[in-house]
Image (tube, coloured by chain):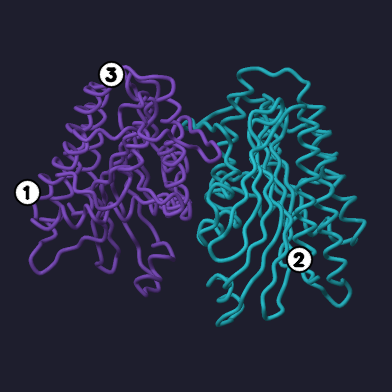
Chain colours: A purple, B cyan
Amino acid sequence: MAFKEDAAQWFMSLQDDICNALCEADGGSLYQEDIWERPGGGGGRSRAFKGGTVIEKGGVNFSAVHGATPEKILAAFQLDKADFFATGVSIVIHPISPLVPIIHMNVRYFEMSNGTYWFGGGIDLTPLYVNKEDAQDFHRTLKSVCDAHHSSYYAEFKKWADDYFYIPHRQETRGIGGIFFDRLAATDTISKAARWAFVQSVGQAFASFYTRIMRKNSAYPYTEAQTEWQKIRRGRYVEFNLVYDAGTKFGLETDGRTESILMSMPPVAHWAYSHQVLPGSHEQQTLDLLKKGIDWV
Amino acid sequence: MAFKEDAAQWFMSLQDDICNALCEADGGSLYQEDIWERPGGGGGRSRAFKGGTVIEKGGVNFSAVHGATPEKILAAFQLDKADFFATGVSIVIHPISPLVPIIHMNVRYFEMSNGTYWFGGGIDLTPLYVNKEDAQDFHRTLKSVCDAHHSSYYAEFKKWADDYFYIPHRQETRGIGGIFFDRLAATDTISKAARWAFVQSVGQAFASFYTRIMRKNSAYPYTEAQTEWQKIRRGRYVEFNLVYDAGTKFGLETDGRTESILMSMPPVAHWAYSHQVLPGSHEQQTLDLLKKGIDWV
């Protein structure tokens, strides 16, 4: 079996594992499954979560698509023509409680018929209220995943996430970052198999970390005012995804399946003109931590 | 006084007239006024509406900014360097009732130090429930404004609006269109003064039309289910503005005042995975009318 088919199989079973873990931790969340086909080749299996006890709305999506390479990529590689194959899992979870952070994870593999290939992905956490203990837990988890594969990964991919998950027009990061990486291929010292093993570890780290955070934080009571703040912050999440997120842009521009791409949208978002927070409040403390370059480990 | 200063003065008084008319029709809406300065030159007067009896959230913004021309425009005109001046009024109103349409209007003037100048603008209506009578009223109003200036304006600018206010990834128009025009300068047969008179007429037509629709439609009762549909449609409004709207993109890319640019965001928006409407419902009838090329007149 070609590597790409292996990878697709593996991503599909990762989707299963993650969905099982989320359902178990949620204590009830069921998802709607849609199997879809891409007119140009391939398709996917989207799983939309809704109305759980912890998860308000989310998606755990698998796809494996192929066909003629989109113009933008051909141009970037100065190619006239090539076929591509892309597969991966993409997740966004919007919990009910403002004390449970929004999470995003994506792991993917891409190759073209000219032999070019790469891995990409990332995982980032968006707490509505930054809790230093959770932030440390998250970054330490990621660092240990990275360190098991290469000593430079965490520092490099953490910085990449800080730069990527940034909202220039708000001058704030989307959340507390995480790791982000793209176009990872083999180098003189790192094999394709080693890159793939790393990507698999990132995918596998998701469920145990996030279900731990779900269980712990969904137990805390919260107020109406905290729910309002959550919705304002979800508005920023929408702004990031629709204005800057490369995956969303790419999907919409290449006629991807809109409902699967926009599963990242929150169930409800609020916008208030010139929204202000009280000095010294937990909201202000959170805003103060939405910055690049914080060493959480 | 140079034309640009005249134009800015006129736009500022248009903002006053429109705010007065909206407050009167709303029977209570007050706005928060922010006078701001642009670091690169000029500034504006933003008026944010909130918590009225008809208007839930909105903005009626004036600005007159100047400085070094942004790179993108220089490149489009193959210029190395030029100063610019831009002034106009920009409006988006999100009413409380799902039976009162969202409206957007924008009129503007732009010039560069090399002598290039143009007018731009448009007005489009986004009913959450398309009412054929109101749609006809709206397009007839616009046609009569256009016809008073040039027999080709309505057909040309109506088509431009159909093409502009379109959401490709949803394969639907944002609403029932209206008129849109950009880069209008003098031609052999149309003077700059005639272009300006047209833009002024567009600006002046806004208040009488929209306050009429506000008064009429805010009197009708509506249901919770209609309010939910309104919020789903507001989500589409967000998608259009953040993914496609040229003014929003330009503003965010050129470090415009974020709170003034994003006054177009609704107070609340909902997203539901694969939202479906009932066959034959008023919602379905509305979706059937979110198409290009409908002759409303």
Q: Give the alpha-carbon distance from disc 2 to disc 3, as whole Å.
A: 58 Å
For label 3, the SS is loop
Residue type at mark 3 is: Tyr
Q: Where is residue B223 in the image (x, y as percent from the top left)?
A: 65, 17
Answer few, some or many: residues within 10 Å of disc 3's Cα (few below 14, many 20 plus, some between 14 and 19).
few
Residue visible at 76% across and 25% down in the picture: B218
Reading the image, the residue beneath label 1 is: A148
* Foreground pick, A97 / A79: A97
* Chain letter belonging to callout 2: B
The answer to whether A202 appears left or right of A170 in the picture is left
Name the disc covering residue B5, or none.
2
Residue visible at 55% across and 76% down in the picture: B75
Residue visible at 21% across and 33% down in the picture: A134
* Chain letter belonging to callout 1: A
Name the disc covering residue B249, or none.
none
Q: Position of residue A14 (x, y in %)?
A: 21, 38
Reading the image, the residue beneath label 3 is: A220
Q: Give the alpha-carbon distance from disc 3 to disc 1, as whole Å.
A: 34 Å
Whether discs 1 and 2 lie on one chain: the answer is: no
Residue type at mark 1 is: Ala
Residue B118 seen: yes
Does B13 appear above or below A58?
below
Residues tagged 1 and 2 counted as in contact (Cβ below 8 A): no
Does A295 appear above or below A36?
below
* Chain letter belonging to callout 3: A
Tell me which label, 3 or 1, sits earlier in the chain. Answer: 1
For label 1, the SS is loop
Q: Which residue lies furthest to the front in this view?
A: A279
The answer to whether A41 appears left or right of B213 in the picture is left
Q: Give the alpha-carbon distance from disc 1 to disc 2, as whole Å.
A: 65 Å
Select label 3 or label 1 by which is in front. Answer: 3
* Image quarter of the C terminus of chain A: top left
